[in-house]
Image: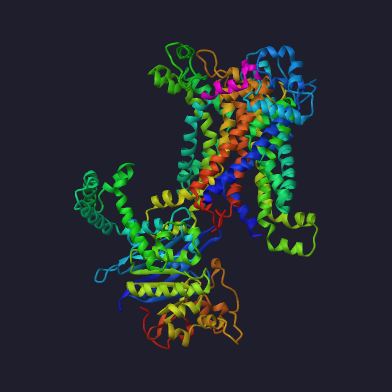
Amino acid sequence: MNELLIIRNLTVKFYTYDGVVQALDNLDLDIKQEETFGLVGETGCGKTLTALSILRLISPPGRIESGSICFNIDDGDEPIDLLAIGEEEIRAIRGSKISMIFQEPSSALNPVYTIGDQVSEVILLHRRQELVNKAIETITALLAGRNSLVNILANPMRLAERSLYQKIAQNPHSLWPRIVGRIPIMRRLLQRLKDEAKKMAISMLKEVEIPDSERVAQQYPHQLSGGMEQRAVIAMALACSPSFLIADEPTTSLDVTIQDQILELLRRLKSERESSVLYITHDLGVAAQICDRIGVMYAGSLCEIARVDDLYANPLHPYTKALLAAVPKPGEEPHAIGGTVPDPLNLPSGCRFHPRCSRAIGMCREHVPPMHELASGHFIACHNYQGETGGSSC
Amino acid sequence: MTSLRFMLYQLRRNPLSIIGIVIILTFIIIAIFAPIIAPPPEGHIDPYMIPRDGYSPIPKPPNEEHLFGTTEGQYDIFYGVIWGTRSAFRVGLIVIGVVLVVGIVLGSLAGYFGGIIDEIIMRITDIFLAFPILILAMAITVALGPSPDNVIIALIIASWPSYARLIRGDILAVREEDYVEAARGMGGSHLRIITRHILPNSIYPTLVMASLDIGAVVLYAAALSFLGLGAQPGYVDWGQMISFSRNWIVGPPGNPLAYWYTVTIPGLFILLFVLGWNLLGDAFRDILDPRLSRK
Amino acid sequence: MELRAYIVRRLLLIIPVLFGVTLLIFGLLQLFSPVERAALYVTDPKQFANIAEVIEKYGLDQPVWVQYGHWITEIFQGNLGWSKVVSQPVTSAMLNFLPATLELAIFATPLIIFGGIFLGSKAAAHKDKAIDHATRLGAIVGWSLPTFWLGLMLLMVFYGLFSGLFPPERLSTEMNIVVHSEAFTQYTKLHIIDAILNGNGRVLLDSLRHLVLPVITLTVVNLAFIMRLMRSSMLEALGKGYILTARAKGLDENTVVSKHARRNALIPVLTVSGYIFAGLVNGVVITETIFNYKGLGWWAWQSAVNLDISGVLGFALFNGVLFVFTNLVVDLLYARIDPRVRLGGKVT
């Protein structure tokens, strides 16, 4: 399988008043076509930052210092480096090729706009061509209608409308919609686009299994339950059938029963659309349920990557082991991980985990362990396994 | 105390707040040392009345004898602005002090007990808040008779409700907190719970912000005296000194700015005084606003 | 449905407040002697000759609740007493002075609101950049400016230094004669509109010239206030999750700010627009006093310095009532802009 996304040497720093925080440290990560990759780790380890870096949405005082994120926009095309392209180009990718679902659905939705408005906004933005073609079709159908009085009166208006849409169809970047959108009376001419987008939004809401979606489209976020809000957010993210979806703890704030429904929904939509998913979570149970491969993150870097069954059956990195042991199981005492999460301003030297690691050896203090492939598809960054098997990380 | 350190750091980092502190300190020094900076002439009975040098209606420009010149009626501008600092502090400190005490008492009663007490106190504040402060203060001053003390009373009456509301809001926010519930569960008296558990945890930011409102209070007081509702003529008061200049805004033909000093100098004193507090207030607002800080 | 309940509840709420407002004014009135209070009931200057009769008629020596009954009855009949400073009943004085003040407010209010919102959003969108620091400094200085001093300084420069460029008062003597001549019909008493309706360009130009400085004076202080508020509420809105969502959708920064952030940021600004009204009224009194601009504020000042209680209390009552209704309108607008208020829900 081909790689959809290749992250190399991604470094993100935060310039706070206390000092510089190295939030991501030379992160390498590959995501394959049509796979669900889970990113797990404790709060603050940099999972969300990795996601935001892909969309280039890190805001000050944070800054992407170096690295590259190569994204395979279409099969066959040269992959593009998301960190190197212009602002306009990354905007065209956000929401259409790569989109994101956020942790807290109630804050991810704008309280003053209806659900329908918010879903159709992204459709209006990225699927304009489709909308325009649909609008032209509708108008042509109307023009061909019977010669009733209403039609005779309305037809000149419709002709004007159609020529406007044809202009847009010929040249998607034409200034016409922008000019017309500024003039109050003329703005009505673009209404048809909005209506078409609204229709698509409603069918999208249906697709995420929101009951009574016509009505919900006219409701405001505060009128929905958390589960419904999250469905609306998912509808928004998938409205343009992105090839890559980032889900940042999408079920954390939901009830367990709803959690399962949302996971099931995500799984179905993902396979229907043949997209890849980066699934961020701190819940190893959820990760096991939905992911194909999992990367374990600690303090800004990855320490282990493996297929999901491999990881759970045979965890290698001491941190992964500790993490798995910390999951409570019936009839067993859960083992808390000793020590505390390191102060981001004052990260330990060498391996970030060595102060808490039971198997730390001398060189852990001095050298950052490189990521290497221990068994096929099982990568680990730990000095304990250094030299056991060869193979490069990429 | 990282928050205190953070606060001091922010204050230090923000050059505007440093300017604010310097301005306020300067005014404090001026107020304390007024008798040395501008000693009253010998035989002058009341130092809070500006000494006059004759009765000529025409202002005199700055000269050796009168550093900032004189107003109409020959009141010495330098003496007036220096001693006026004292009356500005007097108005500001008294009004804010009383208003805060009233605000804390009524605000905690309303916020802590809620129910009918809250309802009554809040409806009363509604009534007072229905008037623009200056208008209500104006009406009260007229009713009580214009004088510096009545300006202070009027400003207290007109401005207490907003502080009571602010403090009530703060208290409402912490009333349901676990530590308050715990104190209640342990059978603490209401007074003890309010003074020991609620007030210390809720109102410091409000108190800090409110005390920086001294600038605004002084501005209102100056406006009232400018309108002629404050002190008797000759009292050391910045607002009144500006009203002395009203007839001397435009000089004789050919020299339109001849009397600039009569309006500019007292006005600059008011502006700087208020600016000092507002600069500090602005810096604090940013620091205390948890939504804007940190990260 | 919820909206209607909200409106009804809101309307009912103003009744006790209005009652309280009249009580407060009436309470202030009690600080005066019956002889002084009589001025509030007089409708004709001839009555001053026989004050005892007025006192008798309105029961000014009787218990307060009887007096309140008489007083409130008179008010509902539109009788607020006699304004000595302008020698006419308070009600007609208010009606006569209102157009001048309205003219001032019509120009200043949009400047304050739209200017403040625009500059505040700009500052927030460019946080910690030069424009943010400049507007911030400008706002703090503007907010600290004594209105009366600013007005006088403006007069010194634009009336004195630039020999009469922007003069005080409402009209020049010459144009005042024109306005009050028979050839000039005063439709609205708003000089600008009347001048346009009469097709008189000179009056129009003259009244505009006289409006410049008062409008600036009135605007600066209040604009600074809105600007600061808008900046901080905009910053808050920009930090919200839905902004990240909007950016992740691929919207350009302009749309993110003007569509997603601004509407949310306006909500807190709207809730304090009552203060803006209060600021305007405060400012009007001072501004009109400085520029000898004969409107409501000037009249209130004249009444105050002449200790004309019927004028001062009449003005205060008028403002109190107006303010209550302004807040009503604000709350209804609030419901319009924030669906959470309109439809009821998690957040109240």
Where residue B198 sits, quadrant-wise, is bottom right
**Residue C334 visible here:** yes
The x and y percentages for residue A204 are 36, 64
The stretch in magenta equals C82-99
Q: Residue furthest front?
A: A148
Instruction: Examine the rendered structure and indicate whether residue C10 appears above or below residue C56.
Output: below
The answer to whether residue C62 is left or right of residue B282 is right
In this rendered view, identify the residue nearer to me: C335 or B9: C335
Q: Quadrant of the N terminus of chain B?
A: bottom right
The answer to whether residue A228 is left or right of residue A199 is right
Is residue C97 within the magenta segment?
yes
**Residue A370 visible here:** no
The answer to whether residue A231 is left or right of residue B199 is left
Instruction: Examine the rendered structure and indicate whether residue A151 appears above or below residue B235.
Output: below
Instruction: Identify the residue shown where x is 65% and y is 15%.
Output: C44
Q: How many marks?
A: 0
The x and y percentages for residue C205 are 41, 20
In this rendered view, identify the residue nearer to me: C218 or C273: C273
Instruction: Identify the residue shown where x is 31% and y is 56%.
Output: A196
Where residue C71 sits, quadrant-wise, is top right
Colour treatment of the image: rainbow
The x and y percentages for residue B29 are 70, 37
Where residue A124 sits, quadrant-wise, is bottom left
Instruction: Identify the residue shown where x is 54% and y is 24%.
Output: C98
The x and y percentages for residue A59 are 45, 58
Instruction: Examine the rendered structure and indicate whether residue A224 appears above or below residue C50.
Output: below
Instruction: Name the magenta segment's main secondary structure.
Output: helix
Is residue C280 within the magenta segment?
no
